[in-house]
Image: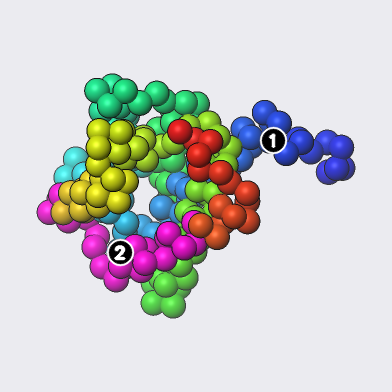
Amino acid sequence: MSELSLPRAGSLPARLLRLYVGLAGYGAGIGLLVHSGLGLDPWEVFHQGMSIRTGWSMGLCINLVGALVLLLWIPLRQRPGLGTISNVLVVGTCADATMALVPAPSFWVVKWAFLLGGIVCIAAASGLYIGAGFGPGPRDGLMTGLHRLGLSIRVARTLVELTVLAVGWLLGGTVGVGTIVFALTIGPTTQFFMKALRADPSRTY
């Protein structure tokens, strides 16, 4: 493809490309984490637990929870953007597609490769969709909404994620070494990709 045919950086087509590649990549990363079987991040523990209890696909649970979380935005006076709505529709769908198309590994080395690959995929995807500037995901917006009520971002995120982790674990979601690895690595990895992709998180709020 010639350079002239590529969308200009910062143009609407380029931002839309970043948004949807990022959201699809985020869903793919979730699918890799699930197939690793080593443990999930708190929200995915909850989504998987919900999937186990309802019999619905995990991707459907991701999308439904995202839509329900959006309802909490109303009293918090948060305004969704295109990225927020797209997040509800795309991430879970791509997670289901990844889990359907990519076979779960049997060997522990490959399981670890799936875990680490999923973390990198989610971090890079976050840099893409955040940098697109079309609004935060439903769960991120919940954190910032609670922050507006007086809670620090750290306290709001900790309370919410510990709650969904505990409920998800009780529902049967997978908590393991991968949960710890995700918690320790996702922040630095996401920061790396946000700098590399020149993503400005302030644009999403």
Seen at 24% across and 63% down, the residue is 175
Q: Is residue 186 magenta?
A: yes
Instruction: For mark 2, give the secondary structure.
Output: helix
Give how far across and how far down residue 183 sits, in percent. 34, 62
Q: How is the image coloured?
A: rainbow
Q: Residue 116: x and y, percent? A: 45, 67
Q: Say if 3 sits above or below 186 in the image.
A: above
> Which residue occupies 46% across, 43% down?
94
Mark yes or no: residue 104 visible. Answer: no
Residue under circle 1?
Answer: 10
Look at 24% across and 60% down and name the residue there.
174
Give the residue at the far front of this rendering: 150
Q: What is the tally of numbered marks visible in this picture?
A: 2
122 lies left or right of 20 = left
Q: Secondary structure at mark 1?
A: loop
Q: Residues within 10 Å of mark 1 (few under 14, many from 20)?
A: few
Q: Amino acid at mark 2?
A: Thr
Q: Nearer the viewer, residue 57 or 166?
A: 166
Q: Is residue 151 in sight in this rendering?
A: yes
Query: Which quadrant holds the N terminus?
Result: top right
Query: 65 or 187: which is nearer to us?
Result: 187
The residue under label 2 is 179
Q: Position of residue 83 (x, y in %)?
A: 49, 31
Magenta stretch in the rendered image: 167-190
Using the image as rendered, state which of residue 31 and residue 70 is in the foreground. 70
The quarter in which the C terminus is drawn is: top left
Q: Position of residue 91 (x, y in %)?
A: 44, 40
Residue 95 magenta: no
The rendered magenta stretch, by its main secondary structure, is classed as helix
Q: Is residue 145 above or below residue 109?
A: above
